[in-house]
Amino acid sequence: MVANVIAPDRRINSLLAGALAAYGLCIRGWVVPDGESPLAKAGLCLAAGEPAHAVCLVGHGGGGFWPIFAAWHRLNSGVREPLDSWSKSVITPIARAVGGEAVFPSDKPWRPFQQWGMAAEGLKASPLGMLIHPVYGLWHGYRGAILFSALDVSGWPEDVARLRQITTHPCDSCATKPCLTRCPVDAFKPDGLAVTACRDHLNTVAGQQGCMTSGCLAREACPVGQTYRYSAAQIRFYMTAFA
Ligand code: B12
Ligand code: SF4
Ligand code: SF4
């Protein structure tokens, strides 16, 4: 776990970190936009229409939460969208307990989770569209966010500046970019993922024996954060959900 969490309110930060750790989840950083930032307008609205002043991003680096989710799933096998349902059942009460409101990446209108991830940890997008993390590589994600209407944000700008200075971007120094040469249907285009080409391939015999079994070959090709690679069961779950 890298220590790059910014805590506008350190008491709330430690309460949240402890509660999330019990489920294999962690704080993936805070976003406290100033009034001028585009982030202040993007997705920062509470259910009652009030503006939110701070976002705590919740997610995972690696697949530590997977055994906890899998045990829950065995007991709740009929639930639709099981990972999203589990995330809601875990994060919603934790958010309420600290006076926040939980929002989720799967709920429409989509909140800008990747923009929040870039602001919170200083991450950048990889050529695949996913954000790359200097430690976890492509093996990380977001399970929710907790919005706060008011929070003591004193000390925030200095902390953010320090964080952004120390963040390195693996893709900047990756000369060969193997992620871009492994996809059998060349689905990664400058304007985004060619979703239909990818899905069509996944439904062929080659796709079933390739990406559906081993995971997205492009993601697998990235050398960064390999020790955080998800388990075979977690990879299969995501591939099945996507295909
Ligand atoms: C819609 C969506 C998709 C669509 C993409 C459609 C498209 N071309 O835009 C589809 C279904 C194809 C998709 C696929 C995947 N997705 Co997706 N997706 C989303 C979702 C729900 C909304 C994106 C969005 O429009 N947001 C609204 C805008 C306003 O927010 P934003 O932050 O500015 O959005 C950025 C993204 O849209 C990004 N983007 C654009 N094109 C693509 C393409 C890909 C593949 C990705 C990952 C991002 C991306 O650029 C935007 C500008 O910064 C987000 C969750 C969320 N709420 O953001 C997850 C999300 C972006 N997806 C994610 C992931 C991991 C995937 C998959 C790899 C599957 C998986 N779960 O493992 C696959 C890729 C398939 C493959 N072959 O491997 C993660 C990314 C995590 C990270 N490390 O960055 C997110 C954040 C979900 C999460 N819970 O963590 N996804
Ligand atoms: S293979 Fe290189 S360019 Fe591709 S995601 Fe990994 S570090 Fe970035
Ligand atoms: S899952 Fe396979 S076909 Fe789809 S983008 Fe990844 S490598 Fe390409």
Image: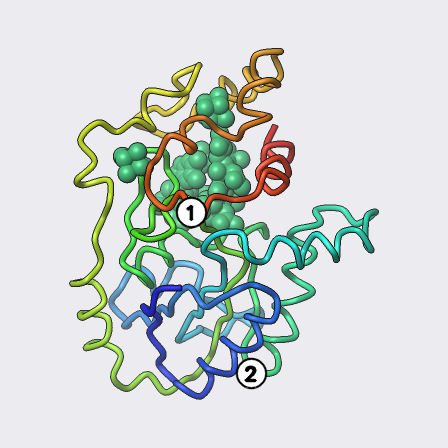
User: How packed is label 2: few (under 14 Cα within 10 Å), some, or many (20 or more)?
Assistant: some
Task: Give the x, y percent position of residue 183.
Answer: 41, 20
User: How packed is label 1: few (under 14 Cα within 10 Å), some, or many (20 or more)?
Assistant: few
Name above or below for residue 167 compared with residue 186. Answer: below
Name above or below for residue 75 compared with residue 171. Answer: below
Q: Quadrant of the C terminus?
A: top right
Q: Residue furthest top?
A: 205
Circle 1 residue: 227
Cβ at disc 2 under 8 Å from ligand 1: no
Could you tell me which residue is drawn at 61 percent across and 75 percent down?
94
Amino acid at circle 2: Gly
Task: Give the x, y percent position of residue 115.
Answer: 35, 53
Amino acid at circle 1: Thr
Say which quarter of the image contains residue 20.
bottom right
Drawn side of residue 56 relative to residue 65, left or right? left
Name above or below for residue 130 compared with residue 104. Answer: above
Q: Secondary structure at mark 2?
A: loop
Gap in angstroms between the C-alphas marked 2 and 1: 36 Å
Drawn side of residue 243 relative to residue 196, left or right? right
Q: Secondary structure at mark 1?
A: helix
Q: Mark 2 against mark 1, which lies toward the viewer?
A: 1
Circle 2 residue: 99
Could you tell me which residue is drawn at 71 percent across and 49 percent down?
82
